Amino acid sequence: MVPVAEGSSNIQPGVKGIWLSKSCKVICDLLGVETSDLRFKARKVRNIAIKKNWHLERFFGFDKDLYEETANHFGPTNDAFARQFLGGSWRDHFPLKSVVKNEYLGPVDCDELLELKESFVEALVGMNFPSARLDEAIQLFLGYAKENNVHASNLRDCHSYG
């Protein structure tokens, strides 16, 4: 495992960690489990990501459209702040960077699906997810991972992971 810098408390969980976190939220919503009742949500996924070195492949979901939407939504307050404290407009100080969008598109094979399923279970158990609903959550997760995935055709034969 790669050591994390001292004092780095807000480490991004990387593309797989973001995907896992979103998966946990989607499944909890489908089951009607209030995520506000769960403990250590972000910390649990982040710790899994660090342990698996997922944090090294950084997530970047900000594209031109999202930049414009965010800049327009927060424009007046951000611009006032930038003019008062930075001596210029917000866009001058924080232009859209030429960064390629980097998102995880789902497991590419059965082994990766198994790793994600195990990480999903570890995350939910660590959050004190209701244990009586865990098997149902796992089945929903497997369906979600297979259906919301550009690699879905590679996962058709992953029957033994349920």
Image: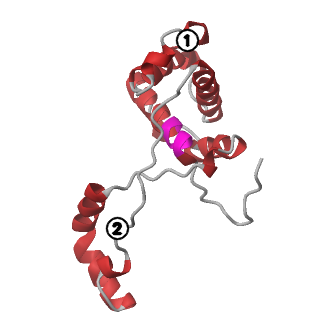
* Whole-percent x, y for residue 157 in the image: 53, 8
Colouring chosen for the image of the structure: secondary structure
Which amino acid lies under the numbered mark 1 shown in the image of this protein? Cys
| Residue at the spot 53% in from the left edge and 26% down from the top edge | 108
Residue range highlighted in magenta: 15-20
Residue for badge 1:
158
By secondary structure, the bulk of the magenta-drawn segment is best described as helix
Which amino acid lies under the numbered mark 2 shown in the image of this protein? Leu
Residue 122: which numbered mark, if any?
none
Q: Foreground residue, 157 or 19? A: 157
Q: Compared with residue 82, is residue 48 higher up or lower down, i.e. above or below?
A: above
Q: Quadrant of residue 122?
A: top right
Left or right position of 127 against 76: right
Q: Compared with residue 34, is residue 56 higher up or lower down, i.e. above or below?
A: below
* Whole-percent x, y for residue 143 in the image: 44, 17
Residue 96: which numbered mark, if any?
2
* Whole-percent x, y for residue 15 in the image: 52, 44
Left or right position of 30 against 10: left
Q: Foreground residue, 74 or 156? A: 156
Q: Quadrant of the C terminus?
A: top right
Could you classify mark 2 by the number of other residues whose Cα lies within 10 Å: few (under 14), some (14-19), or many (20 or more)? some
Q: Compared with residue 101, is residue 124 higher up or lower down, i.e. above or below?
A: above
Upstream in sequence: badge 1 or badge 2: 2
Residue 16 among those drawn in magenta: yes
| Residue at the spot 60% in from the left edge and 41% down from the top edge | 45
